[in-house]
Image (tube, helix red, strand yellow):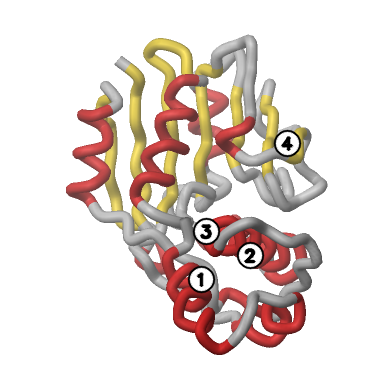
Amino acid sequence: MNQKILNQLILDLGKGGITPEYIKSTFDIDLDKNYNNVEQYAQAIDDAVLHRYFSKVWQSDMKKWKHSGLQLIDEVNKLRPRAVLDVGCGYNEFKGKIKYLIGIDPYNDRADVVINTIDYKSKEKFDVILCLGSINFGSQSKIETEVAHCASLLEQDGIMFFRVNPGVPHDKPESKWIDFFAWNVPFILELAKKLNLQVLDIRDDTNKRKYFVYRKI
């Protein structure tokens, strides 16, 4: 749940109903469907805000990352993976460069499968999963659920590469209502222990991001 959006909705409820006009003027998105409660509205608005931002505003620059950009192509291919999943692949820039890769993304039609992370199912397990800037939004519970789902898709001894945001907002005005989760090293270690994952590496990356690597044990 996006707490920023939920809090704003609750604050404004006394001023009137949640109408399409109110949603447009407050969050600058169009939402025509009616929902039963404020939590459902918050979820729908959050999804619409993320969809608009990552499909129309955000641009990728894989060259800027110190550890989690284009250099991962050789690193992953050296592992000789049988199957690779790129979670939140954006423009699917690793497609054709990393072998046997499937890119999923809820907001970008260049993905092989347009779907939310938690809704993606697969009969096969993956040797490598990339989560580069994609599991960054919402509550700690949501983050844990998404990482746990990725871990369930990972083969035993498989590797997951992460780039995460320590809660730094983007500078675009359209990102105002995005709830950036504040990743930190203690949480990375705690999550590994909870999900039976081994931490292979943790480093500082460009733009105050954290880069880390899990192995499924």
| Mark 3, secondary structure of its residue | helix
Q: Amino acid at mark 3?
A: Glu
Mark sitting earlier along the chain (3/4): 3
Q: Residue at x 58, y 37 (%)?
A: 117
Residue 40 vertical position relative to residue 176 in the rendered view, above or below: above
Above-or-below relation of 164 to 31 = above
Mark 4 Cα-neighbour bin, 10 Å: few <14, some 14–19, many ≥20: some
Q: Earlier in the sequence, mark 2 or mark 3?
A: 3
Q: How far separated are the C-alphas under marks 1 and 2? A: 8 Å
Question: Residue tagged by mark 2?
Answer: 45
Spot occupied by residue 185 in the image (x, y as percentages of width and height): 22, 50
Picture disc at residue 39: 3
CB contact under 8 Å: marks 3 and 1: no
Nearer the observer: mark 2 or 4; the answer is 2
Q: Are marks 1 and 2 in contact (CB under 8 Å)?
A: yes
User: For mark 2, does the 10 Å Cα neighbourhood hold few (<14), some (14 to 19), or many (20 or more) residues?
Assistant: many
Say which of marks 2 and 3 sits in front: 3
Q: Is residue 26 left or right of residue 114?
A: left
What amino acid type should be assigned to the residue bearing mark 2?
A: Ile
- Image check: 34 left or right of 133? right
Determine whether label 2 and label 4 are within 8 Å by CB.
Answer: no
In the picture of the structure, the residue carrying the numbered disc 1 is 5
Residue type of the residue flagged with mark 1: Ile
Spatial CA span between label 3 and label 1: 9 Å
Mark nearer the N terminus (2 vs 4): 2
Residue at the location (55% across, 89% down)? 15
Q: x%, y% of residue 22?
A: 68, 83
| Residue tagged 4 | 95
Q: CA distance from mark 2 to mark 4?
A: 31 Å
Of residues 143 and 105, the one drawn nearer to the viewer in this rendering:
143
